[in-house]
């Protein structure tokens, strides 16, 4: 048993990647019955979660900022290698994916009755892609995993989506393809300009700072555009509301919960880790972009009548905080951005689940069609209220922790003083204060949403609706329990990634200090 355990720990990351691939293949050969496919998918997803927990609680040392669980295999010569590794930043995102996958599968029961084998196989392929992005330490391998997510997500929207699913799926495909083109160009440019003769991300991060400034700027911008398309950020955000509206509920949960975080992870891992000088030079512009995202998307939420569009634009707004945290170049800002990604993954998944439960029973997402739903669905009301409170960053819930750290880090950042004139410093703080308007706006549109759906005059045509099923209660209880736990005791999560985050900030500050 000891030898078996040691073997697993030596190949833990490749095992985590292999499990969803095996699941996809096995499910493809099963009888086309939804319960069987769902149960088997759930078993495999729990195995992934168990493996991730074993990795975290066995030999993973959060205080060790170097890469851990390194697996480095020859693939295409010595240039392109199958290299996997993890640190605090990547393992926290892997943990988020492992937590979300079982609840997404449980929530898929009413959706996957049509073509269940294909549905659950595609879900497992998306899982492989996302986990690969977070674990890859070869830049070419990172690109391949990034692109792998495109096709299964396209089919999940196009086959099981709403009335305009073909339009939404094609728009998602086009935006994601453009992002992939930008990344591929950046990968090749970095490889040839660095002269490192390898795609190893650890090596390239050391070489990137020595290449000519114009090449650094070009690489940074190509990577950054790719990542903010996925995040998403203005002006590349329009694919997200359409995709969310047409995607089935579990796919929306997965999309908002973890796929958007691939963009944030890429900004931390590559834009900050490879090109700190360029990040510093463009920091003020990134702060402006973050402020536009945070406030602009929050204003857009106020004029929506579709519940899914409100949550979608809310995601754009909340992902703007990730940009604000990165641009601050402070430990608090970086840490808050990572916490924000994790927290938003749980909260947005819960909100899309709740909207999906209402839509399944009423076949409408238009807020104007509702009213007085508390009487007919009291359990749904309680969960909906808690999720909304977390989304508007109520203290003692996880949404508060990330936003507070980001605001503190951005407002107290000394980075803006490195600009030659004080107007930049003042303008940077003004952008942060302008972003703080979103706190009021978010409270406004979330409370207004609760009021219009659950309060006020009762719409008697919904009087015979059934409240939440047991499976729905289980999903929501799991997600929101973690929101409460990490809101009350955030250090239990931040201890996992904070040493790696602090080391990244120290590295960036050291390089930027030489400007």
Image (spheres, helix red, strand yellow):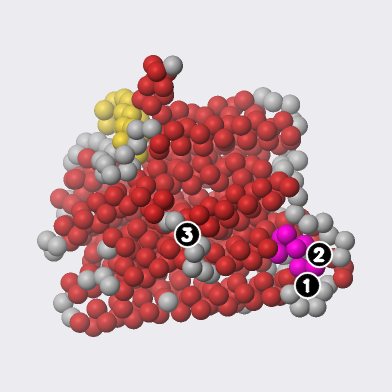
Upstream in the sequence, badge 2 or badge 3?
Answer: 2
Q: Are marks 1 and 2 in contact (CB under 8 Å)?
A: yes
Can residue 159 be seen here? The reply is no
- The quadrant of the rendering that contains the C terminus is bottom left
Image-based side of 300 in relation to 324, left or right: right
Upstream in the sequence, badge 3 or badge 1?
Answer: 1
Residue 371 in which image quadrant:
bottom right
Range of residues picked out in magenta: 374-381
The image's mark for residue 376 is 2
Query: Looking at the image, which residue is at 21% across and 55% down?
Result: 506
- The quadrant of the rendering that contains the N terminus is top left
Determine whether the residue tagged by mark 1 lies in a helix, strand or loop.
Answer: loop
Residue 96: horizontal and vertical position, in percent?
Answer: 48, 47
Q: CA distance from mark 3 to mark 1?
A: 31 Å
Quick one: label 1, few (<14), some, or many (20+) residues within 10 Å? Answer: many
**Residue holding disc 1:** 372
Determine whether the residue tagged by mark 3 lies in a helix, strand or loop.
Answer: helix
Query: Looking at the image, which residue is at 45% across and 43% down?
Result: 94
Residue found at the very far front of the displayed protein: 488
Image position of 116 with respect to 404: above or below: above
Image position of 169 with respect to 38: above or below: below
Viewer-side residue, 356 vs 487? 487
Residue 403: horizontal and vertical position, in percent?
Answer: 42, 67
Q: Are marks 2 and 3 in contact (CB under 8 Å)?
A: no
Residue 61: horizontal and vertical position, in percent?
Answer: 31, 39
Query: Looking at the image, which residue is at 19% across and 60% down?
Result: 509
Badge nearest the viewer, 2 or 3: 3
**Residue holding disc 3:** 488
Residue 299 in which image quadrant:
bottom right
Viewer-side residue, 421 vs 399? 399
């Amino acid at each position: 048993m000891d030898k078996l355990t040691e073997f697993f720990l030596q190949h833990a990351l490749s095992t985590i990647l292999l499990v969803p691939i095996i699941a996809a293949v096995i499910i493809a050969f099963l009888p086309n019955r939804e319960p069987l496919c769902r149960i088997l998918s759930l078993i495999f997803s729990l195995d992934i979660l168990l493996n991730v927990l074993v990795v975290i609680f066995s030999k993973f040392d959060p205080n060790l900022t170097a890469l851990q669980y390194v697996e480095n295999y020859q693939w295409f010569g010595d240039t392109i290698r199958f290299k996997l590794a993890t640190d605090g930043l990547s393992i926290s995102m892997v943990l988020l994916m492992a937590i979300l996958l079982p609840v997404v599968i449980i929530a898929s029961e009413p959706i996957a009755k049509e073509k269940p084998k294909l549905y659950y196989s595609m879900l497992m392929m998306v899982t492989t892609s996302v986990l690969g992005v977070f674990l890859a330490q070869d830049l070419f391998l990172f690109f391949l995993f990034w692109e792998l997510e495109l096709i299964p997500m396209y089919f999940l929207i196009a086959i099981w989506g709403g009335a305009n699913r073909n339009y939404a799926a094609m728009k998602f495909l086009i935006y994601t393809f453009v992002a992939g083109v930008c990344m591929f160009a950046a990968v090749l440019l970095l490889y040839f300009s660095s002269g490192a003769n390898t795609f190893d991300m650890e090596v390239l991060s050391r070489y990137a700072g020595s290449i000519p400034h114009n090449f650094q700027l070009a690489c940074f911008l190509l990577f950054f555009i790719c990542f903010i398309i996925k995040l998403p950020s203005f002006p590349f955000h329009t694919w997200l509301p359409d995709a969310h509206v047409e995607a089935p509920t579990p796919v929306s949960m997965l999309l908002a919960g973890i796929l958007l975080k691939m963009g944030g992870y890429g900004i931390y891992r590559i834009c900050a880790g490879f090109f700190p000088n360029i990040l510093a030079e463009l920091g003020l512009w990134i702060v402006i972009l973050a402020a536009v995202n945070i406030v602009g998307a929050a204003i857009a939420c106020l004029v929506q009548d579709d519940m899914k569009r409100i949550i979608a634009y809310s995601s754009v707004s909340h992902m703007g905080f990730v940009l604000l945290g990165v641009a601050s170049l402070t430990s608090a800002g970086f840490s808050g951005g990572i916490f924000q990604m994790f927290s938003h993954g749980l909260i947005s998944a819960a909100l899309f689940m709740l909207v999906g439960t209402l839509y399944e029973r009423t076949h409408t997402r238009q807020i104007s069609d509702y009213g007085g739903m508390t009487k007919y669905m009291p359990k749904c009301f309680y969960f909906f209220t808690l999720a909304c409170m977390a989304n508007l960053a109520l203290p003692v819930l996880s949404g508060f922790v990330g936003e507070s750290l980001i605001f503190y880090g951005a407002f107290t950042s000394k980075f803006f003083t490195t600009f030659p004139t004080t107007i930049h410093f003042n303008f940077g703080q003004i952008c942060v204060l302008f972003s703080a308007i979103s706190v009021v706006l978010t409270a406004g549109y979330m409370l207004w949403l609760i009021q219009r759906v659950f309060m006020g005059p009762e719409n008697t045509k919904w009087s015979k609706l059934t409240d939440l099923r047991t499976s729905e209660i289980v999903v929501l209880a799991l997600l929101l329990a973690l929101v409460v736990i990490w809101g009350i005791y955030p250090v239990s999560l931040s201890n996992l990634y904070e040493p790696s985050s602090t080391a990244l900030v120290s590295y960036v500050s050291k390089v930027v200090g030489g400007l």
